Each structure stands twice: as C-alpha cells, then as structure tokens.
Image (cartoon, rainbow, N blue to C red):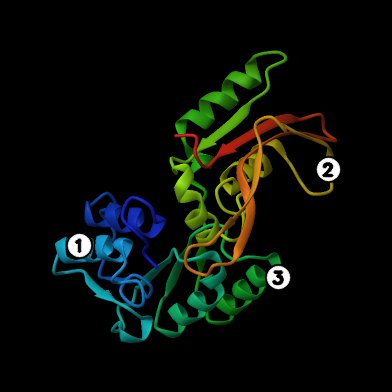
Amino acid sequence: GCGVPKRGMGWYHAKNLIDGECPSAKLTDVVEPFFLGPAKDTPAGKTFGEFAAASSPAVAFHDSLAKMPKRGPPFLALISGRTADNPKLLKECIEGGATHVYLEKPGAPSVPELEEMAAYAKSKNVPVFMGYNKNVTKYVTLAREFEAKTPGAMTTFIHNNAYKEEELPECFERNAEGMLKNMAVHELALLVTFYGVKADNIVSITADKEYSRLMTLKGPSSGKDFTDFAAIGFTLTTSAGKTVSVKANRTGG
C-alpha cells in the first residue's frame, strides 16, 4: 500500500526514492490495491491517480502484488499498508521474491502476530527491518544531552499531526490499531530505547486529562464506530527513577 500523496507513509517513502534521497536504491514498482481498485473514482483515488500518471515511466504501478513481475535479487519490499494487513502482505512479498523487507511501524496489530511474521521470515532466510526515525534525529539527541547535564530536568516528547477535525473519522478508521500503536509508537520507542521503560518497571502513569481527547467516530468507508484518542498526554515514572512525558495530538498542526 502506498497511500494518498502527502498523507500515506508509503507515498513519503516512494517520494524519497523517486527524488534520489537514497542513492543506493531504485524504486521499480508501487502496489496500491485500494486507490487503484475500489476507491479509484473517489477524490483520494483521483489524487493518487494523478500522482501515478505524473511519475517516471520507470516506476510501474499495480493494483495487486500478483500482477507485479518478480524483481532482483536483491529486491527490497517496503511494506507501508494498513497495520492490520501487514501480516498478509509480508508473506505475499516474500512469496513474490522479496529478499529483504522494510516493515513500517508498528508492524502488526499484536505481538503474537509480529512473532509469527518474524518466524516466517526467518524460515525463508529473509531479513526484516523496522526503523524508528526519531531515535536518530538531532532534536532528540540535543534534548537528551540537555536533560543529562541539567539537574532536575525532565523531557516531554511532543508529536503533532496536521489533520483537520473533519478528517478525524477517516484517520481513526485507517489507523484502527489506535494512536498509541500508530502515531505515538515513535515516542514509545524513544521511552524504551533511552529511558529503559518496560511493561514491568512502570511505577506510575499520570494522565493529562485536560490535554487528552477520547472520541468515538464513524468511519466513512465502513460505517463502523472507531474509538480512539484525538490527543493523549501522560507522564510515567519507572522503578529506576526515570520520569518522562509524552504528548501526541492528531490536530496539533
């Protein structure tokens, strides 16, 4: 899955490759079943169609993996679909000849599914990579350095999306795994990596109730209700005495 331009993470990855920001890689194919299939006549589908039409002829677009010719080796499959589809997509990519896989976070809806995916990829000798870019960003490094040398300092990681209020129903539906597993998973990765946070060493979690917004909205495609946070804020402390805060806001700008 590629997603809508300027919204889907797959599109951002594709654009980086098309613009030559990763000189060692070449984009050969884009698979987008939804916007080249049942949603092709929707406004978002038409936007995606314009992106496909304007792309280089060297990049082939397909509405299914089955229609994509085998590439490589080496052949890296970059999976950036809906989280719920990732277990199926991983197997399809490996069956289609992928020698390496880059899996967009959080990888799968649950830990058991991730473990099953890892076991399958290992059985096929296909390495799978998942990166969290905030772990290596300069601003995180600077914040951690300042905290380390400033007595009494505590870091708050703030993550804003630029959705409009009327766009939240589609956002909730498309990211049905929920904000903590989707948007704020980057901050959770920072907490695990740099603050030693584990499920069994959290002493306290204090919710920022004034900042947080929990909503139930109707998905525009399925008509089903989706309950999620439009904004969430909390401060946690570990048994090692580490305290850190997170604030994430879908409409923060």
Query: Residue 224's x, y, as percent?
Result: 59, 66
In contact (CB < 8 Å): disc 1 and disc 3: no
Q: Position of residue 106 (x, y in %)?
A: 57, 58
- Residue bearing mark 3: 112
Label whose residue precedes the other's in the sequence (2 or 1):
1
Which of 218 and 27 lies nearest the eye of the viewer?
Answer: 218
Q: In the rendered structure, which amino acid carries the disc numbered 2?
A: Asn
Task: Report whether residue 79 is seen.
Answer: yes
How many C-alpha atoms fall within 10 Å of the one at disc 2: few (<14), some, or many (≥20)? few
Q: Is residue 180 visible?
A: no
- For label 2, the residue is 201
- Element type at marker 3? helix
Residue at 28% x, 84% y is 69
Q: Is residue 86 above or below residue 92?
A: above
SS label for mark 1 = helix
Q: Which mark is residue 10?
A: none
- Residue drawn 51% across and 67% down? 128
Q: Earlier in the sequence, mark 1 or mark 3?
A: 1
Circle on res. 50: 1
Separation of residues labelled 2 and 1 (CA atoms): 50 Å
- Which image quadrant is residue 52 in? bottom left
